[in-house]
Each structure stands twice: as C-alpha cells, then as structure tokens.
Amino acid sequence: MYLYLKNIAFVAAGTVPQNTIENLSGFAPAFAGEYYVRADMLYKDDISRKHFNELFPVNKEVMLIGTHPDDVFIFAGRLATLLSKYHPRTSLVTVSSDETGVTDSYAEYYRSRESFNSSIGLKEAKRIIRYEEAELNAKEMGFKAMHKNFDLNWPIAPDGERYIFGTNRLASYSCIFEEPTEDDYHKIRDFVFYKKADIYVMAAPFSFHPHHRAATNLFLKAIRKFTPDAFLYFWSTPQEKNQPGVTWHDDILLYYSAEQETANGVGIKHSNRSQNDRIGDDDFYSGMSKEIAEKIAKDNRLENYQYAEGFAPRRLVP
C-alpha cells in the first residue's frame, strides 16, 4: 500500500516503488570517479587528506541527518567523528526520538534513579530517555550536542510491518509506520530554510526501513525547495543497493582500522542502552554497525582495511 504526502511516496517493506525507481534518474552523480579516505591516516596520507578536503571543504555547511538518534553513529560514525574534529561547520540532527522502542521495564528502571523525577509518567520517561541518548550519541562522536532533535513520533510495534534490513543481527524487524503529517514536513522545511547546508548526509531514499525512507524524502522535498544545488551523500547497506531497480554504488569510501571500529562499538553501546535492552543483547547495534562496515570493506577492498563506510554522492536534477 502506498501512503502519500503530496508527491512523496512510501511503500511496503522490501520493495522500491516504481515512481522511486524512476526518481533515481532525478539524481545525478555529484562527481565522477571514486574517492577514498583512510580515516586512521587522514593527516598522514596525502590522498586521504586531499579527498576529505574536496568532499567537505571547510567553508561549506554540512548536515548529518539521522532518522533515529543512533542512525548516524551506526552508518556513518567514523565520518561523523572526523567531521566533528576537522570540520567545525557541521550540524547533527535527528528526526524521530523513537521512544516507543523503549520497554516499560527499562523506563521503570530509569524512573527509579535518584536523579530522576519519579512523578513523570512512563510515556514521558521514554521520550526523555531517547532524548538523552540522542545527546549522548552526539557527544560520543565528538559533538558538543545534538544540533536539532525534531522529536517526531513515528512508532514501532511488534505486530507491525516486517521487513528485511540486511544484516544477520537485524534480519527482520517490525514497524507500524504512520504517514508523516503536514506538520512533520513543515518542521523540517522550516529548519532547512533557516539552516541551509551545502552538503547533506543521510539514508538512501530506497532504504528498507520505512522511517528512513520517510525522513530522507521529507528532507529531499525541503532541499529541492531551498537548496537544490546541494551535494547529497547517501548511506545504505549493501543489501539495500542490491534491490531491483537500484543501480547506485558507493563512490565515497571511508576506510578505518580495527581499533577505530572498537571505539565505534563502545560509543554505540554506551549511547543505545535502551534499544539494546529491548532486544536483550548489549552488543546488538554495535554488532550491526560492524557487520555493515565489514561487508562494505569486503566489497570495496583497499589494502588490508577490514572496515569501511560507503556513500553514494548525488545531486538533484532540476
């Protein structure tokens, strides 16, 4: 079933709607050829430094967009860490706090802490938990704070839509997806108008996750209106890129060491305790990030690097 917000379409899991396939021709590659950066040798390796500075010029505004508080960390954590260190004009935003992913038992435990106001209800406690985790995600990646949290409520539930996300740890997932409202779009539209960026980094518009697709399409609608010449760098899992009708591949590759992968995992684990608790695995989301990075590195082997983040560069076609 298709859900529409004006000219934006959302579709059931595991498929790419025909109008989205056609819309892939509405994106042009941002540049020709492949860029690669060795994250652990950024300012020791001339090619890595040259590529990074060309991709993210210091005089350009960059916006990292995560649908949920942990998305940027999971899919682009190394890039975000580099940007927080070397690119001061970088904004980090999250669209949905995803508080319905917090279990009642975890919220009750959280409310029992001495520093927490126990009179706050469970629903509000869950929202606060995810809001605080969003801030912790930002700090773990080197930012002082999350620059914007839209706090949109797009719930998940066990009896929702099931879809394949493309890793062993997250082989399937349940989601009840509520169509974004006009108010949701207006919040994003107004933010893009006042906080225009030259470069946007976000999930691919063909993501298996309905929340990711929705957030990206809402931003793309606003970007087309206010900053149509912006560069767009999209992340996706290798499995998502293998969908029928999708011909994208990663032209931007960020390779990093096992030591940096360990640091990524620790950060993801510390800032996503409520989500790991829901699944019953303290290393669930850090493990998922690691699996994706291993697969991208394997598919785009450079020397002996075991981990990589990949991005497809695009621009909107007028």
Image (tube, helix red, strand yellow):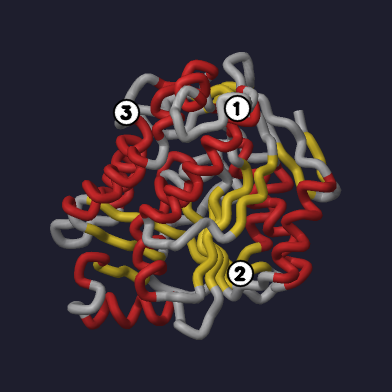
Residue designated by label 2: 315
Q: Residue at x 58, y 46 (%)?
A: 67
Give the structural element (helix, strand or loop) at label 2. Answer: strand
Mark pair 2, 1: CA separation: 34 Å
- In primary-sequence order, the first of circles 3 and 2 is 3
Mark pair 3, 2: CA separation: 38 Å
Mark pair 3, 1: CA separation: 19 Å
Residue designated by label 1: 100
Q: Which mark is residue 212?
A: none
Quadrant of the snapshot with the N terminus: top right
Q: Quick check: can you spot residue 222?
A: yes
Q: Please, what is the three-letter code of the amino acid marked with disc 1?
A: Thr
**Residue, far left:** 304
Q: Residue at x 66, y 76 (%)?
A: 229
Most foreground residue, 239 or 170: 170
Residue designated by label 3: 282
Q: Is residue 2 above or below residue 206?
A: above
Q: Is residue 304 above or below residue 172?
A: below
